């Protein structure tokens, strides 16, 4: 196969991958985009197998079957609330793969590398190993296997610098070594890089987890791209660079959405800028004042009447919706409200959930029309004119403390201004703080009605209360 034909084939596969990624812009196109990108990667794998001599076909086939079976089993069993942890885990596996390739190529005595290839090998080895340990820690935090609060060691920054110095020194030594000395130096580099990844990620708290996940996505792609340079494979370079670029862009978007300084998030400093002086929350209308005592049954009756009387409703989903598996009930409730002539939309905060786009995936799974989803900047001016805001399992993204109180994990983070609506219905499991650990002052406002308990059960009860035969009975009972 001539070099021109080889280049044309490679570019065709890369173009197909880009077309698939381009389809991710909308939920409707995402499924087709996934299929297109998967086909591109399948072609890339087959092409690599065709172009290279396979020394142990049986071993390769066994690895493909076992790996594919494990991946398929995990994909089939994982739930929506486990997806963030799984995504972090997959980043780690990408780091392991990059480290393994770099290690093998750096120790191949019969095929000396060019200076560029050797440097790329060391970078792929170190970045891949650090990505692995950082991703495993992030996955453990997202799966609630570790505490969510940051862990800061004495002299944390100095420890990171020392680890970087050790890694650099070992790489320099390995470049001049051979045989057993080279292998030991590379193993030492791997070990130091694994520790580096852990120390780097352990001081990033739960509130900043979307930034960490996006950043690890970028480093996994970067490690893969460096390995592509080592083995001189254009397809691997392109795929890795694409992942690195998209992860970097996503990291920047997450920092902007959270009003974070990127360097401070990753350095473990005060992650949010100080909040700008915020005006006091507008007092609730007289009719919205809470009674002295209210049972959950009374609160539910009032909530049904408020939804029945409302002209406009904004639904704010959060991680609690994913935890309760309530997305289908929420979608049914929105549809019922529209049938009753209400204006219904969804307000989706960029960092709602445990990873970027988590709520969008949940709502797409429940077939919520993408046109109903409104981003924070678009929807915030609408809250003062909104009759009812329905919060489903969200806390930090609607917490006024973010714009009122300094020196908290969410201080300065833009929020959905649910507190400006005429009435707020909160369908959360309890009144405990969200992922950041900051108490939510929205719960104490006179205009807020708390409907505590399992979100799925609560939304189902609201939905049944809006059935045609139930609405009249509820209104007559409340008026009586």
Image (cartoon, rainbow, N blue to C red):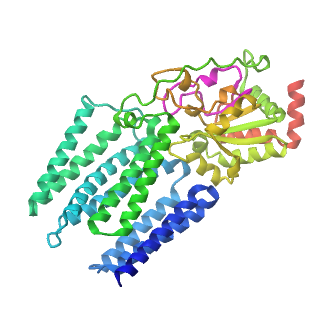
User: What residue occupies the far bottom of the structure in this picture?
Assistant: 1
* Residue 447 among those drawn in magenta: yes
Q: Locate residue 99 relative to residue 438 in the image: left or right.
A: left
| Residue 143, visible in the rendered structure | no
Picture layout, residue 254 above or below residue 74: above
Main SS, magenta region, reads loop
**Residue at position x 19%, y 67% from top?**
113
User: Percent x, y for residue 216?
Assistant: 39, 48
User: Percent x, y for residue 54?
Assistant: 29, 79
Position of the C terminus, as image quadrant, is top right
User: What residue occupies the far front of the structure in this picture?
Assistant: 4
**Residue at position x 14%, y 48% from top?**
169
Picture layout, residue 396 above or below residue 145: above
Q: Quarter-wise, where is residue 415 in the image? A: top right
Instruction: Tell me the magenta residue range.
Output: 421-449
Q: Quarter-wise, where is residue 7 in the image? A: bottom left
**Residue at position x 38%, y 79% from top?**
6
Front residue (pair 150, 225) = 225
Position of the N terminus, as image quadrant, is bottom left
* Residue 285 among those drawn in magenta: no
Q: Locate residue 420 relative to residue 187 in the image: left or right.
A: right
User: Percent x, y for residue 344?
Assistant: 75, 42
Picture layout, residue 153 above or below residue 80: above
| Residue 268, visible in the rendered structure | yes
**Residue at position x 48%, y 21% from top?**
406
């Amino acid at each position: 196969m001539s070099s021109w034909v080889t280049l044309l084939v490679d570019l065709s596969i890369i173009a197909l991958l880009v077309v698939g990624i381009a389809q991710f812009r909308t939920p409707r196109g995402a499924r087709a985009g996934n299929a297109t990108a998967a086909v591109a990667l399948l072609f890339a794998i087959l092409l690599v197998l065709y172009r290279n001599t396979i020394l142990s076909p049986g071993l390769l086939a066994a690895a493909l079957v076992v790996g594919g079976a494990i991946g398929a089993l995990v994909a089939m069993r994982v739930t929506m609330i486990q997806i963030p942890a799984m995504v972090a885990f997959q980043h780690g596996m990408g780091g392991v793969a990059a480290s393994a390739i770099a290690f093998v190529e750096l120790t191949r005595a019969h095929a000396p590398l060019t200076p560029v290839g050797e440097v790329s090998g060391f970078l792929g080895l170190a970045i891949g190993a650090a990505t692995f340990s950082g991703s495993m820690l992030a996955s453990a935090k997202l799966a609630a296997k570790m505490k969510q609060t940051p862990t800061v060691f004495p002299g944390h920054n100095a420890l990171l610098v020392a680890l970087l110095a050790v890694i650099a020194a070992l790489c320099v030594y390995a470049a001049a070594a051979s045989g057993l000395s080279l292998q030991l130096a590379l193993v030492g580099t791997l070990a130091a890089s694994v520790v580096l990844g852990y120390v780097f990620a352990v001081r990033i708290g739960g509130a900043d987890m979307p930034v960490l996940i996006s950043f690890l996505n970028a480093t996994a792609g970067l490690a893969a791209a460096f390995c592509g340079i080592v083995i001189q494979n254009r397809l691997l370079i392109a795929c890795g660079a694409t992942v690195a670029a998209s992860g970097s862009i996503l990291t920047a978007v997450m920092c902007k959405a959270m009003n974070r300084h990127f360097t401070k998030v990753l350095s473990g400093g005060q992650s949010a800028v100080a909040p700008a002086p915020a005006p006091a929350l507008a007092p609730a209308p007289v009719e919205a004042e809470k009674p002295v005592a209210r049972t959950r049954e009374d609160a539910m009756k009032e909530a049904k009447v408020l939804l029945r009387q409302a002209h406009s409703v904004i639904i704010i989903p959060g991680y609690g919706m994913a935890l309760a598996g309530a997305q289908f009930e929420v979608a049914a409730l929105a549809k019922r409200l529209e049938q009753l002539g209400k204006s219904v939309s969804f307000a989706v905060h960029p960092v709602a959930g445990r990873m970027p786009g988590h709520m969008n995936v949940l709502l797409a799974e429940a077939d919520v029309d993408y046109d109903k989803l409104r981003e924070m900047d678009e929807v915030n001016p609408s809250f003062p004119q909104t009759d009812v805001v329905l919060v489903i399992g969200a806390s930090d993204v609607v917490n006024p403390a973010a714009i009122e109180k300094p020196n908290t994990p969410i201080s300065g983070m833009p929020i959905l201004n649910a507190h400006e609506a005429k009435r707020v219905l909160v369908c959360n499991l309890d009144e405990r703080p969200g992922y950041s650990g900051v108490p939510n002052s929205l719960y104490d406002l006179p205009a807020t009605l708390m409907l505590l308990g399992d979100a799925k059960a609560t939304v189902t009860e609201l939905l049944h209360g809006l059935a045609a035969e139930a609405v009249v009975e509820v209104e007559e009972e409340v008026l009586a």
